[in-house]
Image (cartoon, helix red, strand yellow):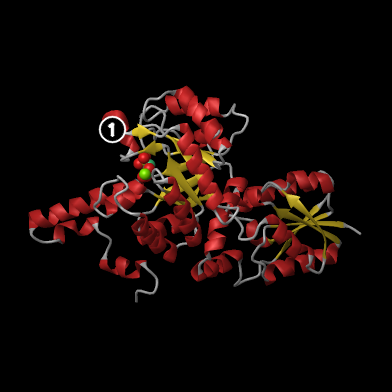
């Protein structure tokens, strides 16, 4: 029997996939190289089903002899291992993102006289069409909640974007750009205490109560499917935090960030310009462990946010607190700084890497925003959060138009600064 190799990502199986396997089976014994979660996440969104579930499905398809993991988008390693006579693929990869991968496959096959067989692409069906339908149907709290941990396992760097209402949630959900042939999008949403409060015209001092914050989350969840990390400020009293954890989980929030401050909380970006008190290590550890005890699912995460650099308590204090909070059960650490210069955070990252009980590290580069995602990744950061940019960009735009109307006593002059009536009527599907 000749060896035939087919690579697949499938979690939404359709007749196009079956057709490829059928054709491949005519040529010999079919091994499917199933892309791992990380391999898929390196070029498109994480599959709905984890690798093990997808493997069970592919193994049960007639014509498939064996399923092995393919852990990169490129085929080279598996091809060198198997040296198949044939590789079978749909003929839709001659152009676009996958062209480079195709060229490499041809190059590998040449080494042992293998052949690439391309099957005419099955029209009117594709994973992206099904994907769109699935998104239209929506998600469940469980599915959404568990996604964040899977993303962390599958991707080197997670990108969060702030959402403070349904519309900014939709922007975070749907915005995609193509950079160097790769689709880029946000992985998850950040519910910011600063922007949720500011959007309501209230100060960021825990004055917007949890019920109200959860209403915002609910509005966002009504129209999105991506996971969310929730900024719970100090987490309040330990007894209250237990309830907060349960409420967030029930809605489908994936993770909560609590900061180690006590008393009246002010926004961290003020630093010591306002009176802020850091919590004792002991008390904050208790808060973390009580939170961990309260969660219902295994997937929910508690992220401990360290304010030592903000409050100028020093690097050693920040590192000591990292160790202590992780020992209390923190699933990730967020380190914050208000300096424009990233040196302080870089120094922390370097030392943090050496901890023997390290967990994922999150940064919020609002002040120190000159650092690129690639550099964060190199320095060992796992989560980057764009914490306030949707609201910060919306406000000056609105203010500008409001002033223009007052100055001109009509809206004609601000036309070009607004999306057209037609565009807004068509912005949200179902408006017509
Ligand atoms: C928020 O977005 O509310 C935060 C991050 O807590 S920061 O404003 O930088 O403190
Ligand atoms: Mg906040």
In the image, 350: left or right of 215? Answer: right
User: Circle 1 is placed at which residue position?
Assistant: 275
Q: Give the SS element for disc 1.
A: loop
Q: Is residue 342 visible?
A: yes
Q: Please name whichever residue, 228 or 35, is drawn nearer the observer in this view of the structure.
A: 228
Q: Is residue 334 visible?
A: no
Percent across and percent down for residue 13 are 67, 67
Percent across and percent down for residue 263 are 33, 39
State the residue at coordinates (7%, 59%).
409
In the image, 357: left or right of 399? Answer: right
Q: Please name whichever residue, 17 or 158, is drawn nearer the observer in this view of the structure.
A: 158
Task: Residue at the far right: name it.
Answer: 1
Percent across and percent down for residue 309 are 40, 28
Q: Ligand 1, what quadrant? A: top left
* Crowd class of label 1 (few under 14; some 14 to 19; many from 20; radius 10 Å): few
Query: Looking at the rendering, which quadrant does residue 416 occupy?
Result: bottom left
In the image, 28: left or right of 120? Answer: right
State the residue at coordinates (86%, 62%).
28
Q: Is residue 57 above or below residue 42?
A: below
* Figure quadrant of the C terminus: bottom left
Q: Is residue 251 above or below residue 335?
A: below
Task: Residue at the far front: name it.
Answer: 239
């Amino acid at each position: 029997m000749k060896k035939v190799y087919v690579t697949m990502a499938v979690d939404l199986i359709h007749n196009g996939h079956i057709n490829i396997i059928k054709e491949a089976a005519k040529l010999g014994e079919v091994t499917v190289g199933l892309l791992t979660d990380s391999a898929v996440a390196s070029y498109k969104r994480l599959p709905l089903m984890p690798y093990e579930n997808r493997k069970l499905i592919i193994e049960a398809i007639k014509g498939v002899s064996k399923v092995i993991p393919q852990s990169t988008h490129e085929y080279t390693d598996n091809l060198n291992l198997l040296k198949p006579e044939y590789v079978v693929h749909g003929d839709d990869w001659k152009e676009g993102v996958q062209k480079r991968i195709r060229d490499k496959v041809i190059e590998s096959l040449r080494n042992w006289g293998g052949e690439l067989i391309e099957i005419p692409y099955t029209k009117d069906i594709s994973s992206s069409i099904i994907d769109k339908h699935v998104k239209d149907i929506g998600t469940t709290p469980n599915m959404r909640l568990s996604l964040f941990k899977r993303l962390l396992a599958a991707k080197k760097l997670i990108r969060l974007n702030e959402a403070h209402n349904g519309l900014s949630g939709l922007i975070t959900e749907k915005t995609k750009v193509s950079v160097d042939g790769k689709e880029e999008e946000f992985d998850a949403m950040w519910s910011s205490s600063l922007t949720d409060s500011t959007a309501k015209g209230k100060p960021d001092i825990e004055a917007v109560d949890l019920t109200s914050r959860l209403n915002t989350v609910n509005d966002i969840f009504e129209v999105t499917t991506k996971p969310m990390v929730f900024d719970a400020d100090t987490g309040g009293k330990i007894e209250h935090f237990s309830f907060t954890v349960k409420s967030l989980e029930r809605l489908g929030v994936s993770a909560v960030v609590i900061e180690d401050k006590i008393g009246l909380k002010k926004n961290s970006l003020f630093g010591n310009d306002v009176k802020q008190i850091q919590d004792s290590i002991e008390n904050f550890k208790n808060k973390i462990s009580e939170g961990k005890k309260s969660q219902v699912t295994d997937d929910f995460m508690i992220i401990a946010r360290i304010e030592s650099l903000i409050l100028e308590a020093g690097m050693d204090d920040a590192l000591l607190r990292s160790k202590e909070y992780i020992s209390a059960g923190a699933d990730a650490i967020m380190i914050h700084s208000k300096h424009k210069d990233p040196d302080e955070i870089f120094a922390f990252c370097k030392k943090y890497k050496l901890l023997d009980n390290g967990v994922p590290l999150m940064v919020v580069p609002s002040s120190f925003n000159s650092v690129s995602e690639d550099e964060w990744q190199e320095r060992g950061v796992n989560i980057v959060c764009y914490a306030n940019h949707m609201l910060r960009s919306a406000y000056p735009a609105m203010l500008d138009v409001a002033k223009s109307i007052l100055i001109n006593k009509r809206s004609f002059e601000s036309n070009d600064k607004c999306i057209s009536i037609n565009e807004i009527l068509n912005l949200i599907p179902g408006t017509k």
